[in-house]
Image (spheres, rainbow, N blue to C red):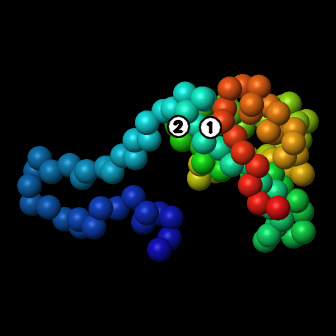
Amino acid sequence: MSNKNKNRSGIVYSTNPDFKPQQEEEHIPALSPNQQDLRVLRDSKQRGGKTVTLVLGFRGSEADLEKLTKLLKTKCGTGGSAKDGEIIIQGDKRDQVMEILLKEGYKAKKAGG
């Protein structure tokens, strides 16, 4: 299915003049940093051999995710992105990311090898 059809509810036509399609809203409750259970791991699969650091398990709004991503990118001095509830930091920065997350009050553990 293409992206342009992603938000359709399956209703094509309605004879009801007051009909409004229902939008599914994903409401993820925001958790404080000490309630977050984050996993930090190194990954290079399907990335052309490039190593990245992944932070998985973030629960909260997109704005909070972007804010944490920007903090990690700034402190690590590298690029990265946030998408689908995970933070991607370029390079093997697991130790540095763990240190920053713990300093900010997040519960974080190293995962993987």
Report which quarter residue 42 is drawn in: bottom right
Amino acid type, residue under disc 1 in the picture = Leu
How many numbered tags mark residues here?
2
Residue beneath the point at 81% across and 39% down: 97
Q: Is residue 1 left or right of residue 14?
A: right
| Marks 2/1: CA–CA distance | 7 Å
Q: Name the residue under label 2.
A: 60
Residue at 25% in and 51% down? 22
From what the image shows, is residue 28 above or below residue 44? above
Q: How crowded is mark 1: few (under 14 residues within 10 Å), some or many (20 or more)?
A: many
Nearest the viewer among 21 and 59 is 59
- In percent of width and height, residue 59 lies at 54, 41
Report if residue 84 is visible in the image: yes
* Residue 68 in the image, given as x and y percentages of width and height: 69, 33
Residue at the image position 72 percent from the left and 25 percent from the top: 104
Q: Is residue 102 left or right of residue 8?
A: right
Return the disc, 2 or 1, that comes first in the chain's sequence: 2
Q: Relative to 29, does residue 54 appear above or below in the rendering?
A: below
Residue farthest along the bottom direction in this orientation? 1
Report the residue that reaches farthest toward the left.
16
**Which label is found at residue 78?**
none
Q: Residue shown at 62%/37% (left/top)?
A: 65
Which type of secondary structure does the marked residue at label 2 adopt? loop
Mark 1 lies on residue: 65
Q: In this view, does 108 lie to the left or right of 97?
A: left
Secondary structure beneath label 1: helix
